[in-house]
Image (tube, grey):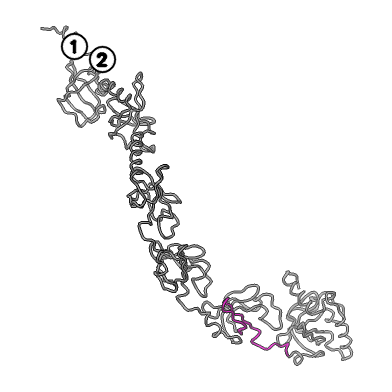
Amino acid sequence: MLTMEEAMKQSATRFAAGEIVKGTIIEVRPKEVLVDIGYKSEGVIPTNEFVDANALKVGGEIDVLIEKLENKDGTVELSHEKAEFKKNWERILTICNEGGTILGKVKSIVKGGLVVNIGVEAFLPASQIDVITPRNLAQFVNNTYEFKVVKINQERQNIVLSRRELIEQERNEKRAKLLAEMVPGDIRKGTVKNITDFGAFIELNGIDGLLHITDMSWGRINHPSELLKVGQEIDVVVLDVNKEKERVSLGLKQKMANPWDSIETKYPVGAKVKGKVVSLVPYGAFVQLEMGVEGLVHVTELSWTKRVAKPSDVLKQDQEIEAIVLGINREEQKISLGIRQLESNPWDNAEAKYAVGARVKGKVRNLTSYGAFVELEEGIDGMIHVSDVSWTRKINHPSEVLKKGDEVEAVVLEVDRPNQRIALGIKQLSQDPWANIDQLYKVGDVVTGKVTKLASFGAFVGLQHDIDGLVHISQVSEERVDKIKNVLKAGQDVTARVIKIDKGERRIGLSIKAASYTDEQLKEEQKIFDALKPGEDLVALQHAFDAADEAKQDGKPE
C-alpha cells in the first residue's frame, strides 16, 4: 500500500502544467464548469470556452489542459479551449495549406474585427466579415459560420480567417450560372438594392441588374422612388445580357402592353376624359388618364377668361378632373388636354354682345400707366386708353380721373376677338366740343373760369364744356409779372378774353389784362400774341401744355 508521500509524488508525476488530460464534468454553473481530473482538487473552466455550453452534461468526459495545479484558492486551473487548440493545431495547419474551409463560432468582438472559435481562437478582420463591411459587429457574436483560413503564423500560433471570400466565391458561381442561363425575355424575381436618379439596381440572387427609369413605366415619372423602395421585391423582364461585361438590363413596363399603341382609338381628339392631377409645374398640369398614360393641360388651356399665373392657383395635386383631348403625338407619347373647352368661350359672342358703338357699364378692375381695365362680366375686360378719357384735357395717368372699384360707363370702340381685347372710350359718351368750337367760343369773347393749373409760363383756366384755356404770363397784367404764383392761385375765379383759337392744336389762348380792352386794343394785343415764337417764350399752346405736363412729371413746383 502506497504511503501518502508516495501517492503525492505519483500524482505530481501524472499531473503537470501544460499536459492534456481527461476530465469528468461534475457540475455546470452559469459562468464556470467544475471538472474532476483525478487530482486532489477539482478544476474550473469558464463556460465561454465551450462552443455550446448548453450541451454540457454532468458526467460527460472532456479533454482539458492543465494551466495551474493549484491557484490561490487551492483549485486547479484548467482550459478546454487550449486543449482543443493543441489537438486541432495540426488539423488546422493541413486545412490552411490546402486552402480549405472550417466551421467556427464567433466568440467576441475585438479591435478591428471578431474572435472566432474554430477549435482554436482565430481572428476575423471586419473587412473580411461580408462583402460590405458591417457597422454592427454584435449581430455576429454567438453565430456559427463557415470560414476560409487565409493566413497562419505558426510561431505565434495566430490564424486569420475570411468569410467574405467564401461569399464572393459563392456569388461568382451564382453569377456565372445566372449569366449562362439568362436570356432576354425572361421574367425574374429580384429585390431593389439601390435607387439612383437614373434608375434602380435590382439584386437577382447573385447578380445585379439595372432597371433604367425609362423602362419603369410607359408614362412619365420624375424619380424612381415614385415607384420603388429599397428592399422591395419585384418581378422584372430581362431586356439584355452582356456576358463579357456581366451586365444585365431589366425592364418593368415591358410586363404590360404599351398603352400608346392604340392611344388614338382610346382617346380620340375631342373626347371628354377623366384623370388625376399627378404633377403641377409652372407651365401646366400633368393628368394621369391611366397607368402609363398622362396628358398635359397647358396653363393657357385652364380658362377662357381668367389670366391664370400658375396651375396651382386653380388645381391641386391628386385632384380628379375632367378635360377634353386637344391633340395626340403617339411617337413622342404626348397628349394635349384642355379644361376650358368643357365650357363655351364667352369671347365667341363678344362681337354680338358688345357691338361697336354700344354703351356698356363696368367696374374699374386695374389701372396702368396707359389706361384702365374695366370688368364687363366675369372674365371679360375692356380697356380705356388714357387718350380716350377726355376730348379736351391731356390725361397723363388714368388715376387723375378714375379709381379702382369705380363704376363707369363707356362706349365700345373696337372688339378684337382673336386677341380677346375690347377697346372702350369715355369721351365718346359726349360730343367733341371742338367739333363746334366756333359756335361755343369766338375771338373777343369775354369768359369766366377757375385757374386749374399753374406753370412757369402761365396759367390754365377751366372753361365751360370741359375746355381749358391758357393765360400766358404776359397776358395776366399790364405790369410785368416775374412769377405767375405771385398773382394767381389754383382755384381762383378769373375773367378773361379769348384772343386766339387754334383748332389744329385744340387750344384756346386767353388774356386777363385784355378783358376790358377796346376792339382796337384787342387787335393790337392779338398781333403781339401771334408774333411770339414757340420754344422761345412757350406761347405756342401745344408746347405750353406739353411743358406743363413735363414739369408735373418731373415733380417741379408749378
- Magenta span contains residue 416: yes
Q: Provide residue 110's location: percent of width, then percent of height.
A: 36, 30
Query: Mark 2 or 1 closer to N-term?
Result: 1
Q: Provide residue 284's location: percent of width, then percent of height.
A: 49, 65
The one of 169 and 19 positioned closer to us in this rendering: 169
The one of 380 and 197 positioned closer to us in this rendering: 197
- Magenta span contains residue 539: no
Q: Is residue 364 left or right of residue 318?
A: right
What residue range appears in magenta?
411-435
Question: What residue type is disc 1 on?
Answer: Ser
Q: Which residue is mark 2?
A: 17
User: Badge 1, how many Cα within 10 Å: few under 14, some, many 20+?
Assistant: some
Question: What residue type is disc 2 on?
Answer: Ala
Q: Which residue is mark 1?
A: 11
Placement of the N terminus among the 4 image quadrants: top left
Label of residue 496 in the image: none
Q: Is residue 51 left or right of residue 195?
A: left
